[in-house]
Image: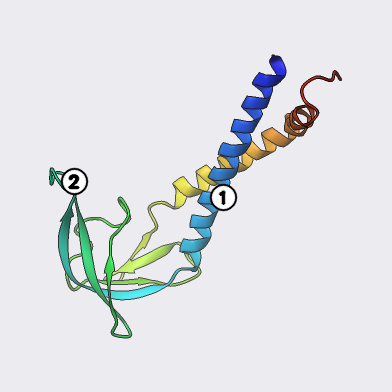
Amino acid sequence: MERVFLFVFFTALLGCSAVATCASTYQLFYFFGFSADFVVVSKYAVCEQPLNNRCEAHYVTRSANGTSGELAPFGYEFESEALEPGSRVVKRDIGFSNEINGKRELWPYLWPHIIVSLLGEAGLLIWYFGGGLKVFNHWLRGFHTED
């Protein structure tokens, strides 16, 4: 029975650690290489039906090359007053900051993603050096053999 608990623990540790590492590292690399240059044209509220009690701001943008688009920021990615119509947002690739009207701001989700990525990597190391391979080997042999 002890092996079953170890198997469940190490499987959960491996799964959670792998998801945390992959998701956070992907977001870090994506934002690091992302570039944008646009001006906010207008903003409007989008409310969740049927109660209309969950509203968020969406923005109509115009890029430097003249194409228009829409921006729906995630959570607290930008301060609410920072993206007023006429605001210019520039995010250069190879960096974790952007400029809003010439004011440089660090990406607010940088440190949480770094911490989650490092915790995920620590979990993978604990899984590996804590005997995760040995537990999986026992599972593959059917839990019926002894060391």
Amino acid of disc 2: Arg
In the displayed structure, does residue 134 sit left or right of residue 91? right
- What is the x, y in percent for residue 7? 68, 26
The answer to whether 72 appears left or right of 147 in the picture is: left
Quarter-of-image position of residue 15: top right
Q: How is the image coloured?
A: rainbow
In the picture, the disc for residue 72 is none
Which residue: 62% across, 26% down?
Answer: 9
Which residue was labeled with disc 2?
54
Q: Residue furthest bottom?
A: 65
Q: Which residue is mark 1?
A: 22
Q: Nearer the viewer, residue 134 or 41?
A: 134
Q: 99 left or right of 95?
A: left
Q: Position of residue 16 (x, y in %)?
A: 56, 37
**42 versus 49 height, above or below:** below
**Which residue appears at 75% of the width and 28% of the height?**
139
> Secondary structure under badge 1?
helix
Placement of the N terminus among the 4 image quadrants = top right
Q: Residue furthest top?
A: 1
Residue at the location (64% across, 32% down)? 11
Q: Foreground: 123 or 142?
A: 142
Q: Would residue 11 be found to the left or right of residue 137 on screen?
A: left
Residue 54 spot, x, y in % from top left: 18, 46
Q: Secondary structure at mark 2?
A: loop
**Residue located 70% across and 15% down the image:** 2
Residue 26 percent coordinates (x, y): 53, 56
Earlier residue among tags 2 and 1: 1
Is 60 placed above or below 81 here? Answer: below
Q: What quarter of the picture does the C terminus occupy? A: top right
Q: CA distance from mark 2 to mark 1?
A: 30 Å
Between residue 5 and residue 69, name the one nearer to us.
5
Label 2 CA crowd tier, 10 Å (few <14, some 14–19, many 20+): few
